[in-house]
Structure formats: C-alpha cells, structure tokens
Image: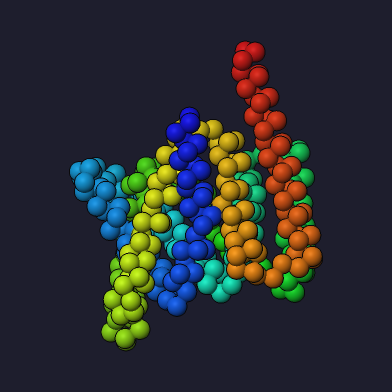
Amino acid sequence: MKKGVWFALTAYVIWGLFPVYWKWLHQVPAVQLLGHRVVWSFVILAFAIGLTRQWRALRAAAFRGRVLLIYLVAAVLISINWLTYLFAVNSGFVVEASLGYFINPLISVLLGVVVLRERLRPLQWVPMGLAAVGVIYVSLAYGSVPWYAIILALSFGLYGLVKKTAPLSSLYGMTLETALMLVPALVYLLYTEASHQGAFLHTNLTITMLLVGGGLVTTVPLLLFGSAVQRIPLALLGVLQYINPTLQFLLGTLVYHEPFSASRFIGFSIVWVALILYGIEGLVAFRSRQAAAVAN
C-alpha cells in the first residue's frame, strides 16, 4: 500500500506542476502542443509495449468493434480535455483550470447518478448542492461562465465514465487512445510544417526538447495513477487527488499572479467547503462499512 501512495502522490504532484511545463511552451499554439503531446505520448507507449513484447497481446485485446468504439470516444474526450487545459494555462486561466479539477469529483458523482443510476447517500446531496452554488457564485463574480473549468470538469468526468466500462489495462488503453488520435495529430503537424508554422526544429533546442518531453510528462503520471488505483483504496485516492488542483491554484495566484478577488475567494471557498464535507461523509461511510465487515 505504501508504494501505491507514493505512486499517487507523484502523479498528482506532476499534474499539479503542469502549468509550469506548458507555460515554458506558451509561444507554441495550443493545437500544435496537443498534436505533439499525442505523437510523443504514442511513441513512448509504443516503445514500452515493444520493449515488453506485448504488441500481439494488445492487438488481440483491442481489435474488436466494441473495444475500438469505447476507446475512440475516450480519445475524443481526453483530447478535448488536453486542448482546453492548454488553452487555459497559456491564456492566463490557471486558477480557473484548478476550479475545474476541484469540482471534477463531484461532476463524476453526478454523472454516476444520472447515467449509471447510482444512488447517493442522503448527506452526499449537501456537498453537491454547495458545489453548484459555488460555481454559480464564481460565474457571477467573473461576470461570465467559467467555461474552462466547466469543460475540463465535464470532459474528464465523461472520460472517467467511459473508462469505467473500458476492458483494457491502463497501458493498453492509453496506447490505443493515442493510436486513435495519432493520424489526425500527424496530419495537422505536417500541415503546420508545410505552411511554415511548425515550432518543432524551427525555434531553439529547448523548445524542441520540451515538445518531445510533453509525451513523457503526459504518460508517466497516467501510468503511475493506473498503478496506484490497483494498490490503495479509492477513499484514500479521493483525498490525495486534491493535491493536483491545490498546486495549480497556488501556482496561478502566487507565481503567475492571476487576479483573485474577494468575490472569487468566496466562490472557491464554497466549493472547498463542499469538497471537505464530501470527503468527511465518504470517510465516515467507508469506516462504517469496514466496521460492519469486521463485525460480520
């Protein structure tokens, strides 16, 4: 279990520091960044599959109509999430992006209720309602709807919902997702080259290496997260996941000095209270189930 905790901590810290990495590439258009992120992620994953001689097993598991459809939907959703995040970070909306990942767990719960017909415990409706109030308040404080936050939360929530029915391991699944995104990404990058808009090999060595490294910083935390899920309870994982948006929030306010007015603080505070209540309720319910299991 200790190893699982370290895997989860490392994954969430890497995700939390993502704004630093992508802001180093702020001069590269977001769509181009997405293309490189897909291509180099696939290269790294394909190398891992080849090194462990698992191509035959991957083909046998993946080349089925239902499986391909599931992962095509997952690939589209994660592409939307990645692209939105890149736009948000390099447009100066790191704080708003962090809000998306703060409310993402509650969005996932809501999707479970609406789509999977899961039942919430009575006390779970309280943080759900508070979170909705917080987002509405933030919208009023912004003077506009926080679209980056909402799109990030919805796309990742729907991605998690699709992956819930996905049959492949995290390594196989991510390899298949990036493979399905590979052709559009390559076509777009070739277009940027032909139109002399490409950044790869046309700027400086640092930018080129960071574009290649985008595949590494994408795949490593996802694989660590996949390993952590198998080793530690979801209740603990649910608490640890707030490391990511907390770090992003602190970077946005303290490092990048994004505006954070008193009214925004109130809206975020409502969301934070909702998350604390949700975490406490979940922990109490988890301990009650453990006690009941021991008693039986």
In-front residue for pair 48/206: 206
Q: Give the percent coordinates (x, y) of residue 257.
A: 64, 69
What residue is at 75 percent from the left and 48 percent from the top? 273
In-front residue for pair 85/211: 211
| Furthest-top residue in this view | 296
> For residue 283, what is the image quadrant?
top right
What residue is at 45 percent from the left and 69 percent from the top? 24
State whether residue 59 appears in this view.
Answer: no
Q: Give the percent coordinates (x, y) of residue 77.
A: 48, 60
State whether residue 260 appears in this view.
Answer: yes
Is 269 left or right of 91, judged from the image as shown? right
Up-down: is 138 above or below 227? below
What residue is at 28 percent from the left and 76 percent from the top? 201
Up-down: is 296 above or below 232? above
Is 82 left or right of 212, judged from the image as shown? right
Q: How is the image coloured?
A: rainbow
> For residue 69, what is the image quadrant?
bottom left
Up-down: is 15 above or below 227? below
Q: Give the percent coordinates (x, y) of residue 63.
A: 28, 50
What residue is at 66 percent from the left and 26 percent from the top? 287
> For residue 209, what is the image quadrant?
bottom left
Q: Give the percent coordinates (x, y) of residue 60.
A: 25, 44
